[in-house]
Image (tube, rainbow, N blue to C red):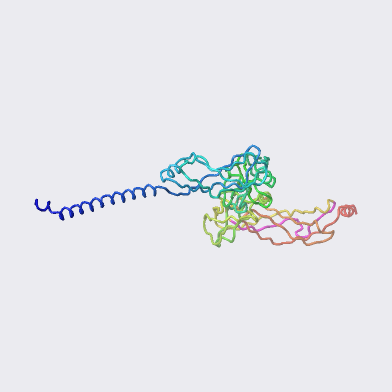
Amino acid sequence: MDKLFRNTWFIKIISLLIAIALFSIVTSEDHDSNNNSNIISNGNDTQTINEDLSANYNDDKYIVLGLPSSVQVRLRGPSEIITNAKLQRTHKAFVDLKNKKPGRYEVPIQTSGFSSSLDVEVIPSTVTVTIQKKLTKTFPVSVDLLNRANIADGYSVGDYEVSPETVSVTGAEEIVNQIAFVKGVIDLKDVSKSVDETVPLNAYDKNGNQLTVDIKPATAKVKIPIENPSKEVPISVIPKGEPSDGYAIESMDVAQDSVKVFGEKDTLDGLSEIKQIEVPVDGLRKTETVQVDVPVPKDAERVEPDKIDVTVHVGKETTRTIEDIPIMVNDIASKDRDTTFTDPESGALEVEVTGAESVLNQLRRTDITATIDVSKLSSGKHEVPIKLEVPDFLHYKLKISKAEINIRNGKKAKDSETE
């Protein structure tokens, strides 16, 4: 071992190996140092954020038009500082218009509140704006009723109320002078009850284009009565057909004597009743309740109820003869004329009446009226139809259907009596 250390070549080789090892260590440290330097250098970053854009100007006198609501801001610098800038709200983008009068300007976009360690670039760097005088006017409020004709069936729209009736509108003089009306909008499609809503208001020019202005108040309270006009009217019924042979109708009882009709006011004003609703009675041999439809009057929307129950009372049929029914003469042409009967000479009739036994048992002579109308007839002899009226549900037969009469004016009749 001692001999090796005394050997010159061995010492030279050992020295060379040690030198190589030391060189490797120094090279490795330099490389690590370069890597650390690169890491520090690579800590810079670039990011783009959106920033609200404001304007410094005399907002008591002027309005600024054409100002974007926001701009992009490109930030370059250390990542940590960029991250902090994004989290903070102390920075802003703005244009300075303090000393500007009405007109059109291209102005630079400035920033403030960003760290001095950051390189800040605004995109775009300038903006073109227009400064106009501020103007305030008062306008009436109107309401646009959409689908007014398409509200629920049977309903109508009354006059609406809006509060407030006027609003104050502020904006650029040129724009405010274009305002034709301020209104809110309500959709009435299929609406069946009164409306009580708060609606936003907007200003429009004469062509219906919406304008950008400040409206105070910005909303209005709207009340719209949705009316359902109706009218209670009486109804009457008549039999349709005949009961079975040997039977007759005693009476018909309706479950209700009136119905409610819905429609426009003008239609209802001209309606007084619904007459002669037909009740089918064909083949009845006993009392029965029949359900019938209530017809909707012309131009009306509907009726409630639309069906009614009618009880048809049926009894045994019989026939009775009523004598000495006087024939009444209707003559409105002249009070001086005299009418005499030649057939029947008595001026009275015999009537055969058929109906339910219970009804005929209560029938009196005064319940039947017979008339002839001679108003349009001249003096002389005539054959005139006899009009007979009997109570409901009864049928009659006359031995003669026409009366033979002689008409004389009053003066001639007196002269004849004098002779």
Can you give x and y, in whole percent of width and height, for residue 352 in the image?
Answer: 65, 58
Q: Is residue 325 visible?
A: yes
Query: Residue at (59%, 39%) from the top-left corner?
Result: 56
Would residue 273 be counted in the magenta stretch?
no
Q: Quadrant of the C terminus?
A: bottom right
Residue 36, placed above or below residue 383: above
Judged from this view, the residue extending furthest toward the top is 60
Q: Main secondary structure of the magenta part?
A: strand
Q: Is residue 196 visible?
A: no
Can you give x and y, in whole percent of width and height, for residue 155 in the image?
Answer: 60, 50
Viewer-side residue, 103 vs 307: 103
- In the picture, measured across the screen, residue 334 lies left or right of residue 350, that is right
* Residue range of the region highlighted in magenta in the rendering: 336-355
Query: Residue at (46%, 47%) from the top-left corner?
Result: 76
Q: Quadrant of residue 373?
A: bottom right
Viewer-side residue, 300 vs 317: 300
Query: Residue at (42%, 48%) from the top-left corner?
Result: 44
Residue 275, placed above or below residue 80: below
Can you give x and y, in whole percent of width and height, for residue 339 in the image?
Answer: 81, 55
Viewer-side residue, 191 vs 167: 167
Residue 60, placed above or below residue 242: above
Q: Quadrant of residue 99?
A: top right
Would residue 351 be counted in the magenta stretch?
yes
Q: Quadrant of residue 195?
A: top right
Can you give x and y, in whole percent of width and height, for residue 356 in the image?
Answer: 58, 55
- In the picture, measured across the screen, residue 196 lies left or right of residue 416, that is left
